Amino acid sequence: SQAEKAEEGRCRSMTKPQSTAAYVLRLTLTLFLITVIVAGLLAFVNYLTADTIAEHTAEAARSAMTQVLAADDYTELPVSDAQAAAGVTAAWRDAGTVVRLTTNGFGGAIDLMVGVDKENKVTGVAIISHSETASLGANCTREDFRAQFAGKTGELAVTKDGGDIDALTGATVTSRAVTRAVNAALAYAGEVQK
């Protein structure tokens, strides 16, 4: 019958194979448009939150400064290219020296603040931010780990390297990174306090 032939022709046209090139082009354009839209949304969210993130980071840095070395006022100190290469990003002085450093741990950058008194002894260590593994390297923020540095001077090392800083269990790379940063802070403070 005429209706059956029309139905059969319609079914054949629906199952007709598409051109491979046209199909790939359509998929490529679709993925490209999705990527552009998502990238635009991410850029917009970053634009909206950039000031808030900067304020929170600055507040965390101010809080860290007072944790590691209590002072009435902090005078900013210069940082040379060689000191910047060692991880020093900023420094201030009053009753001692406060040094902000960035070091590479196991999971990425660790941003920390180290206080050093006039006798070139560590007064405290504060972790501002990190991207270390939870329950392992992230334990570098624990008070008992950071307290080991207080009162220390000279070249510090973890116990596995012959020093007296107990490394975090399962996070020796992070422990060495923090110790390396404290050593850089002590070296910087030793130079500026002469």
Image (spheres, rainbow, N blue to C red):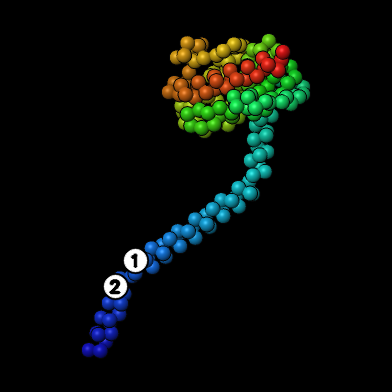
Q: Is residue 73 above or below residue 108?
A: above
Quadrant of the frame with the C terminus: top right
For residue 121, side relative to residue 2 (left or right): right
Count of residue discs: 2
Does 57 appear above or below 103? below
The residue located at (60%, 14%) in the rendering is 150
What's the CA distance linking mark 2 and mark 1?
Answer: 14 Å
Kind of element beneath mark 2 = loop
Residue that protrudes farthest toward the bottom in the picture: 2
One can see residue 104 in this view:
yes
Nearer-the-camera pick, 125 or 82 = 82
Residue 72 figure quarter: top right
Viewed as shown, does residue 9 lie left or right of 185?
A: left
Question: Of the residues shown, which amino acid type is indicated by label 1?
Answer: Thr
Q: Nearer the viewer, residue 109 or 66?
A: 109
Residue 142 occupies quadrant: top right
At 30% from the left edge and 77% from the top edge, which residue is drawn?
Answer: 13
Secondary element under disc 1, as helix, strand or loop, is helix
Q: Residue at x 73, y 24 (%)?
A: 77
Q: Quadrant of the N terminus?
A: bottom left
Question: Pointer 1: what residue?
Answer: 20
Disc 2 to disc 1: CB gap under 8 Å: no
Residue 111 vs residue 180, the one in the foreground: 180
Specify few, some or many for label 2: CA neighbours under 10 Å numbering under 14, 14-19, or 20 or more: few
Q: Residues within 10 Å of mark 1 (few under 14, many from 20)?
A: few
Q: Position of residue 76 (x, y in %)?
A: 74, 26
- Residue 86, x across and y down, in percent: 59, 24
Give the labeled residue for mark 2: 15
Q: Position of residue 22 (x, y in %)?
A: 38, 68
Position of 82 with respect to 21 (left or right) is right
Three-letter amino acid code at the position of disc 2? Thr
2 or 1: mark nearer the eye:
1
